[in-house]
Amino acid sequence: MALTVQRVVPILRIFDEARARDFYVGFLGCDVDWEHRFSERAPLYMQVSRGSLVLHLSEHHGDGSPGHTVYVAATGVRELHAELQAKDYPYLNPGMGESPGNDGGACLTLLDPFGNCLRIDERVASRVV
């Protein structure tokens, strides 16, 4: 039987639940889909999403190190940029860049409080390879 990938969900390491919620929920506009802890004092593992963007955020030591980059192919990047610029979030004021494909597209790079990068890119003429 051939492999069929249904979805890829990156796991991003976080260190502070309040700061993670402030960025992913308050600033980026994600919903918290679910949360898990093995006990009341155990590290948090949760899923956040905004539309079809789904991310797992983890305080667990073995779930990677900070500083990962996640490439997100999307549409509506300029609109997202305008939405984020209108928010009162003192820790990030993202600029807008050109898509790496040099095709007139837009690329928005967001750094979370833990050094993880979301590169949200809208290509116009070329396909993502």
Image (tube, rainbow, N blue to C red):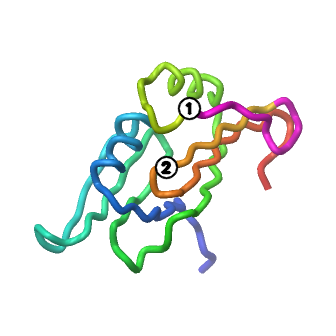
Q: Secondary structure at mark 2?
A: loop
| Amino acid at pointer 2 | Asp
- In the rendering, at what x and y percent does residue 41 appear? 14, 70
**Rendered image quadrant of residue 102:** top right
Quarter containing the C terminus: bottom right
- In the rendering, at what x and y percent does residue 71 appear? 65, 53
Is 1 on the left-hand or right-hand side of 60? right
Q: Residues within 10 Å of mark 1 (few under 14, many from 20)?
A: some
- In the rendering, at what x and y percent does residue 90 appear? 44, 32
User: Magenta stretch: residue 101 in it?
Assistant: yes
**Rendered image quadrant of residue 101:** top right
Q: Residues within 10 Å of mark 2 (few under 14, many from 20)?
A: many
Query: What's the mark number on residue 66?
Result: none
In the image, the segment drawn in magenta is 94-104
* Residue at 34%, 41% in the rendered image: 22
Quarter containing the N terminus: bottom right
* Residue at 54%, 61% in the rendered image: 8
The residue to which callout 2 is attached is: 112
Up/down of 74 relative to 33, above or below:
above
Up/down of 1 relative to 41, above or below:
below
Residue extending farthest to the front is: 90
Up/down of 77 relative to 121, above or below:
above
Residue extending farthest to the left is: 40
| Amino acid at pointer 1 | Asn
Return the residue nearer the eye: 75 or 121.
Answer: 121
Q: Secondary structure at mark 1?
A: loop
Is 81 on the left-hand or right-hand side of 54? right
Query: What's the mark number on residue 93?
Result: 1
